[in-house]
Amino acid sequence: MNFELEFGDERELERQFFRITIKALRESVTQNPYGFIYILQNISLEKEIELLLRKNIDFKNSLLSVISHDMKNQLMVIQGFTDVLRNELAEMEEFSEFEESLNGISAKTYEMQTTITDIRSYLKTLGTFEEDKELSMIDLKEEVNYVIFSLESAIRTKNINLKVVWPVDPDILIKADVRLRSVFNNILDNAIKWSPPDGEVKILIEKKKNFWLCSIEDHGPGVPDDLKEEIFKPFKGFGSGDKVGSGLGLSITSEILQSYKSTIWIEDVKPQGAKFLFRLPIADQRAEDSNPDLE
């Protein structure tokens, strides 16, 4: 039996921590206890180091709690009042004059909820990208199909023509983890969002020397040259109206790929559009390659 007791003195600023361990002494045949051993350890230094190590984690968890609980609750209240106003004003002849404003409030409320979710996801990823941590063999085709299925509603709403081109290899195995879904989800979701209605989005998987080259391209407005690198930094999103984001999705994507020893970059699509390219290691190989010129 192990437990800890905290002793302190009101006159002292420093707290002392002790661990008391109690172990029963038992007879070899009957296993009946005939005595106990008490061990008292001063673990103050151990506790001090532990508290220092946990300081940043505690701060992050507190911030996550505030964001996910207090702010989302307030947004739910705003949305609730908006719905009440919509119901109360619906019978009025002048309702159309208020409807646009109510729709604007609802849209901004949803946008703020999405931003909070993005920030929460970003904070959760901080410090979790240790090299080769819990990586396993994953079927790339299964992961991509899973993401496509999860975005089916958005694809159908904009009537996007989604094309997926697979390599001839029957098995597309990579060394990664479940975070790979976030990589494809963030890029594909952006491609759908920026594509015009009835537009085309293309996913292409090609086999290179020691990695799979993955690309997702759309025919939206493209990414300006001065943002092609900045866009992967936190809070560097761009856009306007319902297309503006928190600027965290692509930052998370870049960090995940870095943990796979991979990189991501953007190329222009003619006559207009953007193509996001990144490497994934084949089987247990690495996608590391300092030269983005892959031909």
Image: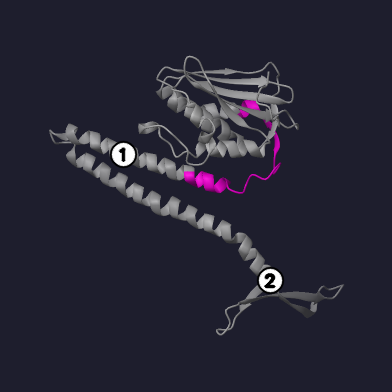
- In the rendered view, does 159 fall on the left or right side of 167? left
- The answer to whether residue 151 of the structure is visible from this angle is no
SS class of the residue under badge 2? helix
Residue 204: name its quadrant: top right
What's under tag 2, amino acid-wise?
A: Leu
Quick check: is 128 in the magenta stretch? yes
Residue receiving disc 1: 106
Residue most extreme to the bottom: 11
Q: Is residue 54 above or below residue 286?
A: below
> Residue at the location (23% across, 39% down)?
86
Residue most extreme to the front: 226
> Residue at the location (81% across, 76% down)?
25
Q: Which mark is residue 45?
A: 2
> Residue at the location (66% across, 17% down)?
167
- In the rendered view, does 282 fall on the left or right side of 233? right
- In the rendered view, does 242 fall on the left or right side of 90? right
Query: Is there CB contact under 8 Å for labels 2 and 1?
Result: no
- The answer to whether residue 58 of the structure is visible from this angle is yes
What's under tag 1, amino acid-wise?
A: Ser
Region rendered in magenta: 119-143
Q: CA distance from mark 2 to mark 1?
A: 52 Å
